[in-house]
Image (cartoon, rainbow, N blue to C red):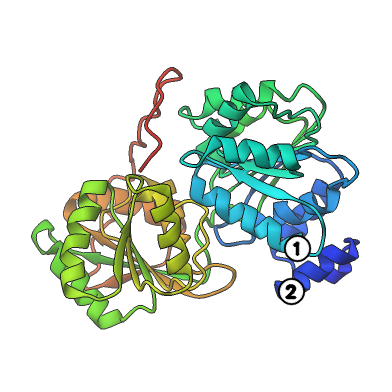
């Protein structure tokens, strides 16, 4: 199906033509009619499948420009994702007078409040800053007709649940709720039921969480030659652009210090950097001014790096969801990509779980390990308790 087959407003179609959007992706084709009909939805689809536009296009279509108030609210877990989301909406709505805006921490709340007072139709927000504005400004959500939780599994985990519940309590009017995510654990689906009315469940990645254009490469190493193995791979593969994930800020900083002595165009991004620095790095990476980006899981959720050809797990991901989100930064929107994961003998149990859970056809760099006698049982990371408020910066 093509966008021109939809009954969209002419100015929206013109904006989509400007973006060279022609064919709908499967998640867009499955969700559009139900979103426009006002149905509550839980949509699960692989990363890079066009979930942002699947949400953004109907929201722009549904805005009533005669109503001078926030009509759609989109909650996202990170500032970077908020900025990406609002850019997508702005591009879709470029030919209209619809005003999207993003609010997030690390930026002047007074400037954000002034913009909201000037008029915003679609608001993208991180939970903490939205709550600050609800408590300390005249922002009203009384005209919100559609509420979106993006990266819903992360937004509804026990670290975010109290913020989400507070925001829902502010929406006392009847409204539509949409949840989009690459992964949706069963316990999170159950939790979501109390927020949605007779939700339509749409799953386009059942048993296939990883993009199909993505090759999954695995290289066994020992801890002492981890850096050397990485450098050898980079020298051989010559990636056009790569993101290298580490499990902690400390590991990322140590790796970056080592790589920048050996390679040109290497940068690092983590939650300890100022917001302006992080935004600059992300934009430079998108413009392909940076070839190698060392990152923590801050960069693993939702962000669209179109030109990234390789994702490398320098540290083995903590669980299968982390693997899915990290590797989803490449092979987006039908493009091809390679994910390389370094592993040691200590990682064999987790390796087997990742391969089986994601239905991966592994490409072994070197000898294939014997996984037949490795127990498939793998304990997930323990969820924090309801009263525990974890640090959100990574």
Label 1, secondary structure: give it.
Answer: loop
**x, y percentage for residue 386?**
46, 19
Crowdedness of circle 2 by 10 Å Cα count: few (<14), some, many (20+)?
A: few
What residue occupies the far left of the structure in this picture?
Answer: 224
Image quadrant of residue 25? bottom right
Please give the name of the residue rendered at 19% of the width and 73% of the height, measured from the top-left corner: 231
**Do the numbered discs 1 and 2 sit on residues whose CB atoms are within 8 Å?**
yes
**x, y percentage for residue 269?**
34, 55
**Is 71 in front, or is 161?**
71
Q: Is residue 340 above or below residue 85?
A: below
Quadrant, the C terminus: top left
In-image side of 163 versus 194 (left or right): left
**x, y percentage for residue 261?**
16, 71
Please give the name of the residue rendered at 8% of the width and 59% of the height, measured from the top-left corner: 224
Crowdedness of circle 1 by 10 Å Cα count: few (<14), some, many (20+)?
A: some
In-image side of 60 versus 329 (left or right): right
Quadrant, the N terminus: bottom right
Label 2, secondary structure: give it.
Answer: helix
**x, y percentage for residue 299?**
42, 54
Q: Is residue 111 above or below residue 236?
A: above
Q: Which mark is residue 190?
A: none
Q: Which residue is mark 1?
A: 94
Mark 2 or mark 1, which is nearer the start of the sequence?
Answer: 2
Please give the name of the residue rendered at 12% of the width and 60% of the height, measured from the top-left corner: 222
Nearer to us: label 1 or label 2:
1
Q: Which mark is residue 18?
A: 2
Marks 1/2: CA–CA distance: 9 Å
In-image side of 58 versus 301 (left or right): right
């Amino acid at each position: 199906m093509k966008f021109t087959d939809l009954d969209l407003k002419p100015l929206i179609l013109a904006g989509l033509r400007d973006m060279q959007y022609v064919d709908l992706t499967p998640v867009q084709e499955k969700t559009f009619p139900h979103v426009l009909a006002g149905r509550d939805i839980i949509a699960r689809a692989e990363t890079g499948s066009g979930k942002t536009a699947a949400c953004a296009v109907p929201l722009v279509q549904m805005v009533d420009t005669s109503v001078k108030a926030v009509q759609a609210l989109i909650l996202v877990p990170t500032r970077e994702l908020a900025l990406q989301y609002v850019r997508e909406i702005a591009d879709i709505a470029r030919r209209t007078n619809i005003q999207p805006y993003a609010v997030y921490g690390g930026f002047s709340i007074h400037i954000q409040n002034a913009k909201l007072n000037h008029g915003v139709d679609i608001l993208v927000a991180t939970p903490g800053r939205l709550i600050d504005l609800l408590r300390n400004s005249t922002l009203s959500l009384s005209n919100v007709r559609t509420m979106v939780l993006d990266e819903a599994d992360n937004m509804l985990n026990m670290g975010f649940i109290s913020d989400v519940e507070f925001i829902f309590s502010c929406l006392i009017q009847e409204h539509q709720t949409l949840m989009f995510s690459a992964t949706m654990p069963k316990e999170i689906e159950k939790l979501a039921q109390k927020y949605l009315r007779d939700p339509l469940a749409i799953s386009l990645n059942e048993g296939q969480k990883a993009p199909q254009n993505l090759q999954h490469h695995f290289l066994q190493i020992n801890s002492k030659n981890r850096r050397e193995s990485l450098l050898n791979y980079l020298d051989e593969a010559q990636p056009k652009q790569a993101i290298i994930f580490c499990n902690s800020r400390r590991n990322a900083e140590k790796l970056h210090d080592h790589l920048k002595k050996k390679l040109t165009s290497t940068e690092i991004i983590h939650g300890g950097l100022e917001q302006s620095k992080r935004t600059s790095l992300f934009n430079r990476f998108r413009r392909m001014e940076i070839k190698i980006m060392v990152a923590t899981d801050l960069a693993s959720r939702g962000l669209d790096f179109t030109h990234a050809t390789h994702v490398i797990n320098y540290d083995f991901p903590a669980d299968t969801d982390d693997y899915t989100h990290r590797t989803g930064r490449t092979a987006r929107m039908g493009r091809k990509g390679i994910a390389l994961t370094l592993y040691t003998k200590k990682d064999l149990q987790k390796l087997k779980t990742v391969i089986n859970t994601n239905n991966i056809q592994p490409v072994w760099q070197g000898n294939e390990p014997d996984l037949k006698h490795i127990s498939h049982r793998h304990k997930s990371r323990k969820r924090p308790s309801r009263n525990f408020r974890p640090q959100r910066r990574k």
